[in-house]
Image (cartoon, rainbow, N blue to C red):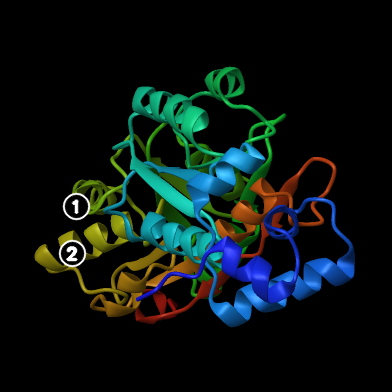
Amino acid sequence: MVRTTVQDVARAAGVSVSTVSRALTGGIVSPATREAVLEVATRLGYQPNRAARGLITGRTGNLGLIVPDLRNPFFADVAKGVTARARAVDHGVFITDTDEDPVAELEALATLGRNTDGVLLCSPRASDADLLAAADPESTVLLHRRVPGLPSVVADIAGGIRQAVRHLRALGHRRIAYVSGPEDSWAAQQRLAALSAAGDLELLPLGGLAPTFDGGLLAGDLVLDSPATAVLAYNDLVALGVLHRLAARGVVVPERMSVVGFDDVSLAAMSHPPLTSVAVPKDRAGAVGLDLLLGRTGATTEREAVLPTGLVVRASSGVARP
């Protein structure tokens, strides 16, 4: 297969190679010339060489994405949103998994910061002070974490928690166990704060557990050792672990215990019983974050986007209590 070159585009458009380069990289050309060059490039199927383009623009055409754990389908969905949007705007993405390690996170940020045009840092575990010291606010965007001074895309956690609490309260629950995630998790702290403000509920925090299915297995025994009649888990993986442990101990859900997760990953609808969960727009967060990184949104002066959440009610929570 013969590859179309920039010289081919220049000949077909009747302009110089340098004019084609300026038209395709945002340089100074007339609107009519830019439109004509883009039409010819599209018709001929021209794919610009990123390395060559980088020599002209000083940019690599590549971005970085750092996530704590790609085994968690939540982060896989975020990555899908990032890569799909990057493909649409002709950028590549390097993805790094830090295995929930804040030191590895900061090392990855330094490495990707030197070798890409910008970095998306998803649910980072590092402290605010460390992130402010390590991250360039002009080329870093946080996903699912808020640090004053850095651009971010976050979900409306408090709104999702309010919907979950309203649902459980309507079912007659007054004692709710909250199975938290890592103590250094910003999202876990936000969920706990929203739950603590819920009012006429007895909140039973069960913290310090891994944000994984195995963490949920451990939490199941702690829940049964408490007076709780309902569980709200840090994320769906933890909630699924709780469901599995309750089933192993002969506890019928939701007749004896209601369980609610957070994130609404694809596995939530496949569990038995299907898991009620607070849905977070994961792929959209990735796309919005990438647009924010590339300066393609009309974000506020604080450069923060807040995305809505919504409760998806399934069988794991659905029995009203007297």
In the rendered image, which residue does mark 1 sit on? 217
In the rendered image, which residue does mark 2 sit on? 244
Q: Residues within 10 Å of mark 1 (few under 14, many from 20)?
A: many
Rendered-image quadrant of the C terminus = bottom left
Q: Left of 291 or right of it: where is 253?
A: left
Q: Residue at x 57, y 42 (%)?
A: 54
Q: Secondary structure at mark 1?
A: helix
Which picture quadrant has residue 20?
Answer: bottom right
Which picture quadrant has residue 310?
Answer: bottom right
Q: Residue at x 42, y 27 (%)?
A: 111
Q: Is residue 240 above or below residue 103?
A: below
Q: CA distance from mark 1 to mark 2?
A: 7 Å
On the question of residue 243 being in view, the answer is yes
- Indicate the position of residue 247 as horizontal and vertical percent values: 15, 68
Mark 1 and mark 2 lie on one chain; the one further toward the N terminus is 1
Which picture quadrant has residue 207?
Answer: top left
Q: Residue at x 55, y 61 (%)?
A: 90
On the question of residue 145 being in view, the answer is no
- Indicate the position of residue 223 as horizontal and vertical percent values: 28, 51
Q: Are marks 1 and 2 in contact (CB under 8 Å)?
A: yes
Rendered-image quadrant of the N terminus = bottom left
Q: How many tags in the picture?
A: 2
Q: Secondary structure at mark 2?
A: helix
Q: Left of 24 or right of it: where is 127?
A: left
Amino acid type at circle 1 is Leu
Q: Is residue 130 above or below residue 51?
A: above
Comparing 164 with 76, the one in front is: 76
Comparing 180 with 110, the one in front is: 110
Amino acid type at circle 2 is His
- Indicate the position of residue 291 as horizontal and vertical percent values: 66, 55
Q: Left of 28 or right of it: where is 274?
A: left
